[in-house]
Amino acid sequence: MPFNPFTIDLPVREIIPFVREHLAAQNTLIVNAPPGAGKSTLLPLALLDEAWGMGQKIIMLEPRRLAARTISIEDRQRK
């Protein structure tokens, strides 16, 4: 049974068609939505079977985690 992202009620569900079209034409997209919207759970799963993504990776950056990691590394280097 194929995965149907439209059966899951998360806010990013509404932008899945736009994201698919955009990424078919360009390889970069920034999605800004509140926590719990489905950016890192639903959206990547909705894109896995796209023809343009076959054999490719989906790379997601989460700015808060990236910032926290950078601060942690800087703190360790100062000690």
Image: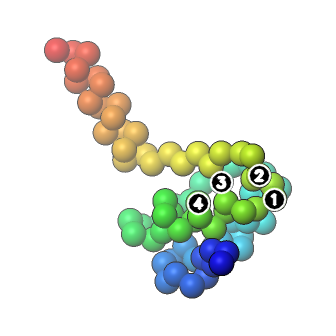
- Type of residue at label 3? Leu
Mark 1 nearby-residue class (10 Å; few <14, some 14–19, many ≥20): few
58 relative to 31, above or below = above
Residue designated by label 2: 54
Secondary element under disc 1, as helix, strand or loop, is: helix
For the point 36% across and 44% down, the residue is 65
Mark 4 nearby-residue class (10 Å; few <14, some 14–19, many ≥20): some
**Where in the figure is residue 21, as x and y percent of width and height?**
78, 66
Asked if the residue at tag 1 contacts the one at tag 3, i.e. Cβ–Cβ closer than 8 Å, the answer is no
14 relative to 23, above or below = below
The one nearer the camera, 47 or 66, is 47
In front: label 2 or label 4: 2
Secondary element under disc 2, as helix, strand or loop, is: loop
Classify residue 54 as left or right of residue 32.
Answer: right
Secondary element under disc 3, as helix, strand or loop, is: loop
Secondary element under disc 4, as helix, strand or loop, is: helix
Residue designated by label 4: 44
Chosen colour scheme: rainbow
**Where in the figure is residue 76, as x and y percent of width and height?**
22, 20
- Type of residue at label 2? Met
Quadrant (top left, top right, bottom left, bottom right) of the N terminus: bottom right
Q: CA distance from mark 1 to mark 2?
A: 6 Å
